[in-house]
Image: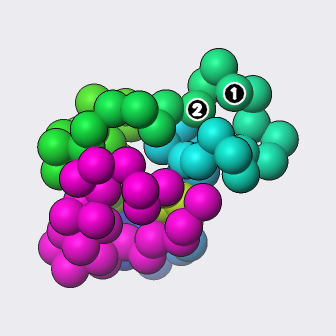
Amino acid sequence: MSRRNGSKDGAGILGMHLEGPFISKKKKGAHPEKFVINDVACEGLELFEECYGPSFYDNTALVTVAPEIPGMLDAITRMVEEKGIKVSIG
């Protein structure tokens, strides 16, 4: 069941918030630095599909990413416009 498809037997989830691993090492908060990835070029949504699996869009409502990662701005645009996912800067 995806976040967009509740049913008569119950509601769909509101949506996951994915925070990391594509965040700023300088502003990583409680995330262990060894799990932060911000030194790879983002080649569109494929980077997210590799990390979370190809169906991560189905139940994801919000993704936090570091926009300074090369190529990330294009991925952000596609996530918002094509997948309806909100994006937070982190």
Asked if residue 83 lies left or right of residue 23, the reply is: left
Residue lying furthest top in this view? 34
Q: How many labels does the image show?
A: 2
Q: Does the magenta stretch include residue 79?
A: yes
Circle 1/circle 2 CB separation < 8 Å? yes
Answer few, some or many: residues within 10 Å of disc 2's Cα (few below 14, many 20 plus, some between 14 and 19). some
Task: Looking at the picture, tell me which residue is in the foreground, 36 or 10.
Answer: 36
Task: Looking at the picture, tell me which residue is in the foreground, 22 or 51.
Answer: 22
Name which residue type carries label 1: Glu
The magenta region covers 66-90
The image shows residue 31, relative to residue 1, as above or below, that is: above
Q: Residue under circle 1?
A: 33
The spot of residue 40 in percent (x, y) is 33, 32
Q: Does the magenta stretch include residue 39?
A: no
The spot of residue 3 in percent (x, y) is 43, 68
Q: Residue under circle 2?
A: 36
SS at circle 1: helix
User: Residue at point 58% right, 32% down?
Assistant: 36
